[in-house]
């Protein structure tokens, strides 16, 4: 008896695709890269990841001043320790074989609810827009404290988040109910498929995070075997956004989270359909980041199944230089918004919406074609 055979579709990461220049070019200074999240408006369509090595109170305030949004992890070191900085130093200086057990130990300490409110109020007092991240499991416990302290954006985030979750609890987190409880914008993630994104949008949330396992410090793909390359994931979720908007008249932005190594990947994210991007490892290079050049994912300290690795980057930039330049390196990790505007200009797109309409091609050789001397120097 014959059985129906499963077929696999191709899926593409940023390294597999390229943008085709347009028939007209535009002055990069005349491009529009604004991003709206509910009633909040941002001149810079960038969110800094809710990772302890990236965002603390001072970084969140600085990010707001540069027109973007930084997300504070309410389940991280900042809410477990009064002086989180000394433990960040400890993690940054630990040996490779000791760093994961160290993090498991540090993150085993209970969250102090007074610190949750203190950190939020400190960001607000410093003039920053305060976004906070909570996992679905602790959202009901922590969101009332965050609301009282004055948070501006709530991010509910885990490795994979769906609109329907089956568990032993009698009633888990229901996003449609959370929407009634919380008046600020709610971002939920992460997901990588059309159907999951559409289902999340139908709960009434404000925006969706796209990406499972592409982060520089994340090992979920190796440990769990799950994930979809980011170019395909972004396009699929963007299709869900567009169809949902056509059907309902409500626009739900999507935010590509992870897999972005340089300005070119940011440009491809927006061309694939993103409304904004979330950055982690690139932000660790800035002097304002508290990780001191070390970077690790939110799932790295998991007590039973760690899914991350500490990675090191050169802390050779400032937040302003990383976002707006001038760049002092040639690897595309600085002046990210300049790269985006220039790419839009050469592709003939005035706005990010127009940028989504440009031609893209499958081009896995785009970074290697004709680059023999660069590759040779890289090996020396």
Image (tube, helix red, strand yellow):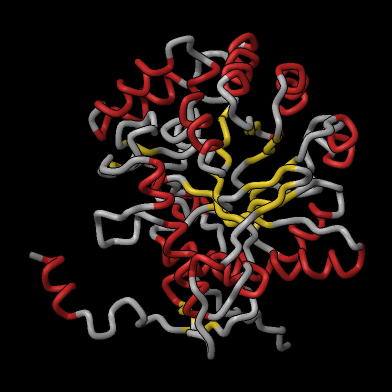
- Looking at the image, is 9 positioned above or below residue 68? below
Residue 182 falls left or right of residue 207: right
Q: From the top left corner, tell me how far across and down residue 75 is, in percent.
A: 58, 25
Q: From the top left corner, tell me how far across and down residue 272 is, in percent.
A: 59, 71
Q: Is residue 211 visible?
A: no
- Based on the displayed image, in which of its 4 quarters is residue 155 positioned? top right
Nearer to me, 41 or 19: 41
Location of the N terminus (image quadrant): bottom right
**How many numbered circles does the render carry?**
0
Nearer to me, 336 or 266: 336
Nearer to me, 272 or 169: 272
Residue 224 falls left or right of residue 368: right
Q: Residue drawn at (48%, 64%), measured in percent from left and top? A: 340
Nearer to me, 317 or 369: 317
Q: Is residue 318 visible?
A: yes
- Looking at the image, is 250 positioned above or below residue 296? below
Q: Residue drawn at (76%, 40%), measured in percent from left and top? A: 185
Q: From the top left corner, tell me how far across and down residue 189 is, in percent.
A: 67, 47
Q: From the top left corner, tell me how far across and down residue 180 is, in percent.
A: 90, 34
- Based on the displayed image, in which of its 4 quarters is residue 371 positioned? bottom left
Q: Residue drawn at (74%, 24%), measured in percent from left and top? A: 143
Residue at the extreme bottom: 23
Q: Residue drawn at (7%, 64%), measured in percent from left and top? A: 380
């Amino acid at each position: 008896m014959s059985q129906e055979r499963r077929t696999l579709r191709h899926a593409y990461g940023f390294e597999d695709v390229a943008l085709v220049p347009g028939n007209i070019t535009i002055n990069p200074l005349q491009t529009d890269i604004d991003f709206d999240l509910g009633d909040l408006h941002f001149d810079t369509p960038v969110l800094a990841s809710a990772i302890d090595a990236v965002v603390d109170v001072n970084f969140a305030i600085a990010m707001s001043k540069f027109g973007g949004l930084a997300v504070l992890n309410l389940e991280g070191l900042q809410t477990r320790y009064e002086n989180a900085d000394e433990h960040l130093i400890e993690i940054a200086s630990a040996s490779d074989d000791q760093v994961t057990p160290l993090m498991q130990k540090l993150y085993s300490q209970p969250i102090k609810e007074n610190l949750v409110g203190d950190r939020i109020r400190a960001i607000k007092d410093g003039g920053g827009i305060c976004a906070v991240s909570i996992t679905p499991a602790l959202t009901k416990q922590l969101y009332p404290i965050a609301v009282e302290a004055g948070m501006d954006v709530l991010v509910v985030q885990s490795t994979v988040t769906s609109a329907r979750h089956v568990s032993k609890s009698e009633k888990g987190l229901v996003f449609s109910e959370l929407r009634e409880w919380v008046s600020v914008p709610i971002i939920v993630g992460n997901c990588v498929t059309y159907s999951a994104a559409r289902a999340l949008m139908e709960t009434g949330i404000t925006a969706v995070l796209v990406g499972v396992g592409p982060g520089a410090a994340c090992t979920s793909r190796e440990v769990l075997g799950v994930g979809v390359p980011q170019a395909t994931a972004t396009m699929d979720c963007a299709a869900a956004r567009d169809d949902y908007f056509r059907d309902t008249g409500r626009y739900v932005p999507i935010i590509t989270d992870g897999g972005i190594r340089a300005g070119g990947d940011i440009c491809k994210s927006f061309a694939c359909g993103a409304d904004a991007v979330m950055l982690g490892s690139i932000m660790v290079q800035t002097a304002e980041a508290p990780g001191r050049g070390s970077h690790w994912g939110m799932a790295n300290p998991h007590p039973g199944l760690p899914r991350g690795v500490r990675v090191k980057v050169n802390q050779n930039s400032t937040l302003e230089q990383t976002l707006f330049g001038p760049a002092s390196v040639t690897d595309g990790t600085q002046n990210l918004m300049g790269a985006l505007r220039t790419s839009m200009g050469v592709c003939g797109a005035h706005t990010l919406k127009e940028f989504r309409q440009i031609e893209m091609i499958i081009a896995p050789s785009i970074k290697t074609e004709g680059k023999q001397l660069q590759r040779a120097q890289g090996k020396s």
